[in-house]
């Protein structure tokens, strides 16, 4: 189970995005509306990697356009990072969900599904050659840094000279802030912004 046969040799983001639409590298495409590929400038200095598209992203075909994406945009402004320098993508390109009434609720992708989709992320990173890669949440962080990596212990720290970028920083996924206790949301958002300020300093 791998997307590798569907990934073209080209490292043009336009070509990669077009090819990803027909990916059948794992079963997740069957229940998804469409592939949600990464989006941003071709000379992005920062690549931010989340877990997978959400319900709205699945419907619109674009990453980080739902509530978590809006919170990310706000946090980037607060951290002093130009949103126009950031490319956003996900470790998994199809929305995995389960029905609850009439709603489609996020379901965490399995390790096999994340691994199957890794060739797409590798191709994006090769095409972009960013200065900094930021993992948003545990799924993306462990996909990039290994299963032993713990965001809770390493968030906001700089890891240099990784195989995929000169600098790597992990933090929480903005959706975890939205799902958390409303009474603690301001504090959680401030901690998230502090992690992103580390990225700003690298730039």
Image: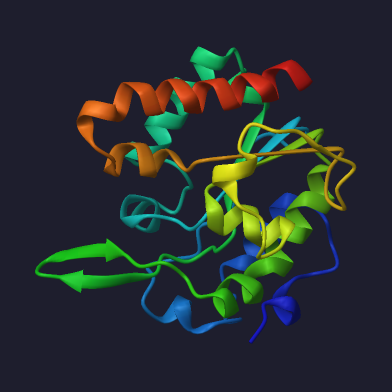
Q: Is residue 156 left or right of residue 105?
A: right
Q: In the rendered view, would you say 198 is above or below 48?
A: above
Q: In the rendered view, would you say 10 is above or below 183?
A: below
Q: Give the residue drawn at x 36%, y 22%.
A: 187
Looking at the rendered structure, the number of numbered marks drawn on it comes to 0
Q: In the rendered view, would you say 128 is above or below 97?
A: above
User: Residue 192's spot in the image, x, y percent?
Assistant: 49, 28
Is residue 190 in sight in this rendering? yes
Is residue 135 in sight in this rendering? no
Q: Give the residue drawn at x 50%, y 57%.
A: 36
Camera-side residue: 17 or 157?
157
Camera-side residue: 63 or 181?
181
Q: Is residue 27 left or right of residue 160?
A: left
Instruction: Identify the residue at the far left of this view.
Output: 101
User: Residue 15's spot in the image, x, y percent?
Assistant: 73, 58
User: Residue 61's spot in the image, x, y percent?
Assistant: 44, 54
Q: Give the residue drawn at x 55%, y 76%.
A: 113
Q: Quadrant of the N terminus?
A: bottom right
Q: Quadrant of the C terminus?
A: top right
């Amino acid at each position: 189970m791998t997307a590798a046969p569907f990934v073209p040799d080209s490292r043009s983001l336009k070509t990669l995005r077009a090819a990803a639409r027909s990916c059948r590298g794992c079963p997740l495409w069957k229940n998804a509306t469409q592939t949600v590929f990464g989006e941003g400038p071709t000379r992005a200095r920062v690549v931010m990697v989340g877990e997978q598209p959400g319900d709205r992203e699945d419907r619109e075909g674009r990453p980080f356009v739902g509530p978590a994406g809006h919170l990310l945009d706000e946090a980037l402004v607060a951290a002093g990072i130009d949103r126009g320098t950031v490319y956003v993508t996900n470790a998994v390109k199809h929305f995995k969900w389960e029905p609850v009434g009439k709603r489609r609720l996020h379901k965490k992708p399995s390790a096999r599904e994340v691994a199957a989709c890794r060739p797409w992320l590798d191709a994006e990173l090769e095409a972009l050659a960013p200065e900094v890669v930021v993992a948003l949440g545990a799924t993306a962080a462990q996909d990039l840094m290994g299963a032993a990596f713990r965001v809770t212990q390493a968030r906001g720290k700089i890891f240099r000279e990784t195989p995929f970028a000169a600098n790597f920083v992990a933090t929480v996924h903005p959706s975890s802030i939205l799902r958390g206790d409303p009474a603690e949301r301001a504090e959680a958002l401030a901690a998230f912004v502090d992690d992103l300020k580390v990225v700003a300093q690298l730039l």
